[in-house]
Amino acid sequence: MTSHFLKDPIISGKAIYYLASAPELDKVSGRFFNLTIDELPAEHARDRQLSKKVYDLSMEMVGLKDV
């Protein structure tokens, strides 16, 4: 039984191959894809304040300084 959140590895592999090699996506960058579908990321993933907090905490936890 597979989790609701996990996708079949063969399907995922084909999607990654397509996204990496499709000529029509040659100039596409910074987008979020669910398999091969261009989607808007979840709201929490677009939260700039939350992103900054996670980044700052991660840098602190690994002992790195912001560059």
Image (cartoon, helix red, strand yellow):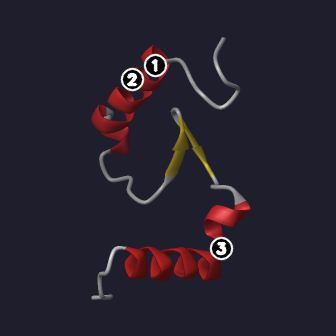
The quarter in which the N terminus is drawn is top right
Bin the neighbour count of mark 3 within 10 Å (Cα to Cα): few under 14, some 14-19, many 20 and up. Answer: few
Q: Is residue 20 left or right of residue 57?
A: left
**Helix, strand, or loop for circle 1?**
helix
Residue of label 2: 13
Q: Earlier in the sequence, mark 3 or mark 1?
A: 1
Question: Does the CB distance between marks 3 and 1 fall below 8 Å?
Answer: no
* Mark 1 residue type: Pro
How far separated are the C-alphas under marks 3 and 2? 29 Å
Question: Does the CB distance between marks 1 and 2 fall below 8 Å?
Answer: yes
- For residue 48, which quarter of the picture? bottom right
Q: Earlier in the sequence, mark 3 or mark 2?
A: 2
Question: Does the CB distance between marks 3 and 2 fall below 8 Å?
Answer: no
* Mark 3 residue type: Asp
Depth order, front residue of 17/6: 6
Q: Residue 9 shows which numbered tag? A: 1
Residue of label 3: 47
Q: How many marks?
A: 3
Q: Is residue 9 left or right of residue 63?
A: right
- For residue 4, which quarter of the picture? top right
How far separated are the C-alphas under marks 3 and 1? 30 Å
Bin the neighbour count of mark 1 within 10 Å (Cα to Cα): few under 14, some 14-19, many 20 and up. Answer: few
Depth order, front residue of 66/46: 66
Q: Which residue is pictured at 49% across the width and 79% down the height?
A: 57
Image x and y of residue 7, in percent: 57, 24
Q: Which residue is pictured at 44% across the width and 73% down the height?
A: 58
Depth order, front residue of 44/57: 57
Depth order, front residue of 13/56: 56
Image x and y of residue 27, in percent: 32, 53
Q: Which residue is pictured at 46% across the width and 19% down the height?
A: 9
Bin the neighbour count of mark 2 within 10 Å (Cα to Cα): few under 14, some 14-19, many 20 and up. Answer: few
